[in-house]
Structures are given as structure tokens and as C-alpha cells.
Image (cartoon, helix red, strand yellow):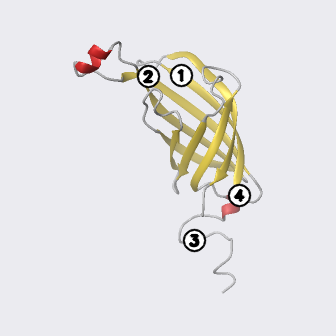
């Protein structure tokens, strides 16, 4: 009975214990030290890391300007170490209200790639990370605005 309720690897789910597992929902604070996002002091990300290596990220700035959540992949890179790579689309504001009235809106303006190196705490309930942001235009060419920063996350739960 003790073995069945323990913290060990679960062959049914393919998941290891929470102490060495990123799967689940997380909330983090991100602070960029360089690039276009350095002025944002209250940036927060919400993540879901799925079993199998896919993920979704959304921020408290997804509405400014409107952008969809980011989607990506993650993998384990060592004991309590993980790497995540995710992409979001960037939009361009309409030129005028008349553009909106004619059926225009927030059109595509490129994308951003984020790569995050995550180190899980010993108890698996928090992490620290480094993050790199690269910005690209509509044709996929790099543009100014990328940067680097740090994050601190906590596992969401009841």
C-alpha cells in the first residue's frame, strides 16, 4: 500500500514525482534585463506543461496589443532541469478608427520566440529560470527588441 501511494515514477502515466516533474500549471514573474520588454516591471506568465512535451503560455499583457497565447515544446535536460521553447504571434495596431470600421483590425506583424532554461526547486513547487526573447518580422527576419531576463515560478494547486 505504501508503494502505491508513494512519490515514485508512475508507469501508468509516464510521470515522475512532482519533485522532478514540470507537468502541470504554473504562474511566474518575468523580469527582462535587456530588450523591448525591459520596461515592463509586472510581467506575469501562466503556463501549462503537458505530459508528452507540449506547452501553452499566456501573459497578463496578452491584451496589449492583442496577441494569442504562446505555444511550444519542453523537455527535461537534467535532474530538475528543463528547457522550454515557445512562440507567440505579434499584431500591429490599426492605423485609425476608420480602418476598424471598414473591417480592418489587428493584423499580423511577426512573431516572438522565447527559450527558457528552468531549474526546479528541491520540493518541486517552485522554479527559477533564465529566458531569452527573439523578435521576428512577418517574413521571419530578426528585428530589434529581443532580450534576456529571469523568471521565478510557483506551481499552481489547491
Residue under the image location 46 percent in, 38 percent down: 69
**First reached walking from the N terminus: tag 1 or tag 2:** 2
Residue under the image location 63 percent in, 38 percent down: 116
The mark found on residue 11 in the picture is 3
Q: CA distance from mark 3 to mark 2?
A: 41 Å
Mark 1 and mark 4 in contact (Cβ < 8 Å)? no
| Residue indicated by mark 4 | 124
- Give the SS element for disc 1: strand
Q: CA distance from mark 4 to mark 2?
A: 35 Å
Q: CA distance from mark 4 to mark 1?
A: 31 Å
Exactly how many numbered labels are in the figure? 4
| Residue indicated by mark 1 | 135
Residue placed most toward the observer, 23 or 97: 97
Q: Nearer the viewer, mark 3 or mark 4?
A: 4
- Give the SS element for disc 2: strand
Residue placed most toward the observer, 92 or 19: 92
Task: Answer above or below: position of 13 versus 6.
Answer: above
For disc 4, the neighbor class at 10 Å (few under 14, some 14 to 19, many from 20) is: some
Task: Answer above or below: position of 157 versus 113.
Answer: below
Mark 2 and mark 1 in contact (Cβ < 8 Å)? yes
Q: CA distance from mark 3 to mark 4?
A: 20 Å
**First reached walking from the N terminus: tag 4 or tag 2:** 2
For disc 3, the neighbor class at 10 Å (few under 14, some 14 to 19, many from 20) is: few
From the top left corner, tell me how far across and down residue 61 is, in percent: 52, 33
Residue under the image location 35 percent in, 17 percent down: 94
Task: Answer above or below: position of 54 versus 151.
Answer: below
| Residue indicated by mark 2 | 110
Amino acid at each position: 500500500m505504501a508503494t502505491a501511494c508513494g512519490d515514485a515514477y508512475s508507469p501508468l502515466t509516464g510521470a515522475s514525482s512532482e519533485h522532478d516533474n514540470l507537468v502541470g500549471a504554473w504562474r511566474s514573474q518575468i523580469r527582462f534585463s535587456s530588450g523591448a520588454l525591459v520596461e515592463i516591471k509586472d510581467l506575469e506568465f501562466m503556463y501549462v506543461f503537458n505530459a508528452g512535451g507540449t506547452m501553452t503560455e499566456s501573459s497578463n499583457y496578452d491584451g496589449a496589443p492583442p496577441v494569442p497565447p504562446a505555444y511550444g515544446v519542453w523537455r527535461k535536460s537534467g535532474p530538475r532541469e528543463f528547457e522550454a521553447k515557445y512562440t507567440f504571434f505579434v499584431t500591429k495596431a490599426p492605423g485609425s478608427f476608420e480602418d476598424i470600421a471598414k473591417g480592418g483590425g489587428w493584423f499580423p506583424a511577426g512573431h516572438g520566440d522565447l527559450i527558457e532554461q528552468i531549474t526546479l526547486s528541491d520540493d518541486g513547487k517552485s522554479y527559477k529560470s533564465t529566458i531569452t526573447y527573439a523578435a521576428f518580422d512577418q517574413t521571419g527576419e530578426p528585428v530589434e527588441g529581443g532580450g534576456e531576463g529571469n523568471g521565478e515560478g510557483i506551481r499552481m494547486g489547491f
